[in-house]
Image (tube, helix red, strand yellow):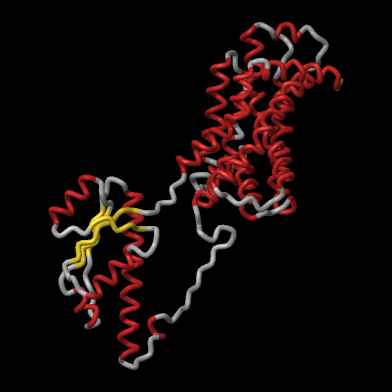
Amino acid sequence: MNWRRVLSVMRKEWWHITRDRISFILLLLSPVLSLVTMAYAFSIDITDVGIGVMDQDLSRLSRQFLNQLGSTDALRLEALPQNLDEVERLMMRGTVKAVVIIPHGFAQDLKAGRTAAMQVVVDGTDPNTAGHAIQHVSAHAEHFAAEQLKGQLARAGLPTEELSPIDLRLRAWYNPSLKFTVSMIPALVGIVLSVPAMAASLALAREREWGTLEGLIVTPIGRAELLIGKLIPYVLAGTLSVPLCVATAVYGFDVPFRGNLWLYLALSVLFLFATMSIALLLSVFTKSQQVAIIGSMIIFLFSGFFMSGLLIPMAIMGPALKMEGYMFPTTHFVIISRGIFVKGIGLAELQGYVVVLAVIGVMFLGLTALMFKKKL
């Protein structure tokens, strides 16, 4: 291994990357732009859903329940329809996503200890929002009915402990508000950092397409020297975008960063090394840049979204699919990114994933060196 020849290849490849300023800026900023776009697309914390209440009972208890429905930011009281025709008009216009119908006798049934009827009409064209509305209306109804029953028993001098035999108190660590973005955005960083690897997949395909590979072949540069010299500039270019992604997550989406930034940067470099080793192997077998970029998108984006635990939890995958998912570096970096961002864990807890990333990178780089032949 002659490091002077490696540096020569690095210098040449760096000129390829930076000579077009617009392309270099896009390579540097594309992970950040992709992170922002995907973060907004996957931010599915549903709040402030507009609902209507058709109160046919018009009692003190029905008004109390109405006030309780609007006491949180999960639901927003938008209208008070008087009849079903008005309910249908509100639904057709999209003004409300659900309407709670409180029938006559609601207060009397509660006071008498009977089951009080109530109906929730939802807009089924948006199942996620409809499910959110049903869940929160049901929770409010159960809590309101339990409080009314406790009050009646207390006024009658009867014990109320039997209504709650278990005092269940919930506490969520690391993400107390259970915000979806706190879990999703650190995982998305692993997806968007695959974008520089897509550019690396063009390294050898570009040389073939432009006819400059023949000039490299006749030089005394060895296969390993050539591949390492092409790999390092792309790793460096990808590393520059890591702090930008972290800053975007923290300051743009209020995602806490509780770990060590230098550790995160070092493991990001290892992840970039692993992904770009795979990209170089792909570049060996492709003849054109278009084929290389399409192949890298399939490998990195498909595995990132569907096999890394980002959208489908690893716990519900079958053994074969789970094993296949662990073959991709994105799966391991998603776990690393979430752990450092949200939990603030260190190298001791992540050493298994670190070893796997290193093995993937070395194995694919070695396989690329074996497959690449210095001949046309």
- 283 over 169 or under it: above or below: above
Q: Residue at x 21, y 70 (%)?
A: 117
Q: Position of residue 122 (x, y in %)?
A: 26, 54
User: Measured from the top left, where is residue 111 in percent x and y?
Assistant: 23, 82
Tell whether 139 sits left or right of 175.
left
In percent of width and height, residue 77 lies at 29, 58
Instruction: Give the quarter of the image for residue 134.
Output: bottom left
Image: 55 above or below 204: below
**Relative to 300, is 366 on the left or the right?**
right
User: Which residue appears at 70% of the width and 50% of the height?
Assistant: 350
Confirm whether residue 314 shows in the render.
no
Instruction: Residue at 77%, 18% (x, y): give it.
Output: 11
Q: Quadrant of the N terminus?
A: top right
Q: Is residue 166 left or right of residue 293?
A: left
Question: Quadrant location of the C terminus?
Answer: top right
269 vs 68, nearest the viewer? 68
Quadrant of residue 23 within the rendered picture: top right
Residue 293's spot in the image, x, y percent?
A: 56, 22
Asked whether residue 154 appears in the rendered view, the answer is yes
Depth check, front residue: 369 or 72: 72
Residue 322, located in which quarter of the rendered image? top right
